[in-house]
Amino acid sequence: MIGFEIKQLFFDREAVTSRVDPATRKVLSKFGAFVRRTAKGSIRRRRKAAPPGSPPSSHTGLLKKFIFFGYDPEQRSVVIGPTRLDRRGQGEAPSLLEYGGQTTLVRRGKRERATYRARPYMGPAFEKEQPKLPAMWRDSVK
């Protein structure tokens, strides 16, 4: 008979999990940085609006400046995306740009309904970087 326990064949052992967790954090953080860089690079700074379906224009530079990523150790995942852009807590702009939709604007004291067509930038950045993820995992656990 072979002189080891079946329990040693599983990947839940301390020796394996202690190496997988830092590798997961490193790989997902690197992936988050790549997606963030790609998304920021797709946003052009110009005065006129971008055509629907293409990445948005950045008129003030705030959209590019406030795209972040963070590793969540509880979920073992990375969150990538823009933060809210206004001080009143109504920062709908990043979501409206990505998915399109309707909102109420206040101009000169009057409320008016505005419809935005999607100008995705995070989804395409994620799709562009996703094929590189398996190569990042390769040889990451040592």
Image (cartoon, helix red, strand yellow):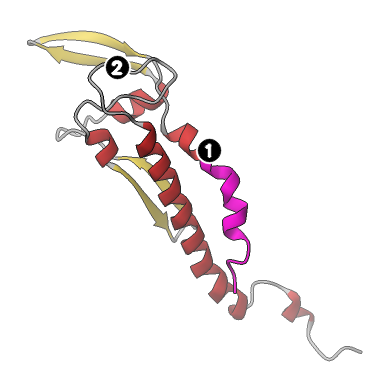
* Region in magenta: 127-142
**Callout 2 environment at 10 Å: few (<14), some (14 to 19), or many (20+)?**
some
User: Which residue is denoted by mark 2 in the rendering?
Assistant: 49
User: Which residue is denoted by mark 1 in the rendering?
Assistant: 128
Q: Is residue 104 left or right of residue 40?
A: left
Q: Which quadrant of the figure has residue 5?
A: bottom right
Please indicate, yes or no, whether residue 120 appears anywhere in the rendered image. yes
Up-down relation of residue 103 to residue 17 (above or below):
above
Three-letter amino acid code at the position of disc 1: Lys
State the quadrant of the C terminus: bottom right
Q: Which quadrant of the figure has residue 137?
A: bottom right
The image shows residue 24 at horizontal and vertical percentages of 52, 62
Q: Is residue 125 left or right of residue 47?
A: right
* Label 1 secondary element: helix
Q: Is residue 90 found inside the magenta-colored segment of the image? A: no
Main secondary structure along the magenta-highlighted residues: helix
Q: Is residue 16 left or right of residue 64?
A: right
Residue at the (37%, 53%) spot, across then down: 70
Furthest residue to the left?
108
Up-down relation of residue 67 to residue 51 (above or below):
below
Q: How many marks?
A: 2
The one of 4 and 58 positioned closer to us in this rendering: 58
Q: Is residue 141 found inside the magenta-colored segment of the image? A: yes
The one of 137 and 25 positioned closer to us in this rendering: 137
The image shows residue 74 at horizontal and vertical percentages of 45, 60
Residue at the (83%, 91%) spot, across then down: 3
The image shows residue 88 at horizontal and vertical percentages of 15, 32
The one of 123 and 106 positioned closer to us in this rendering: 123
Residue at the (34%, 18%) spot, across then down: 50
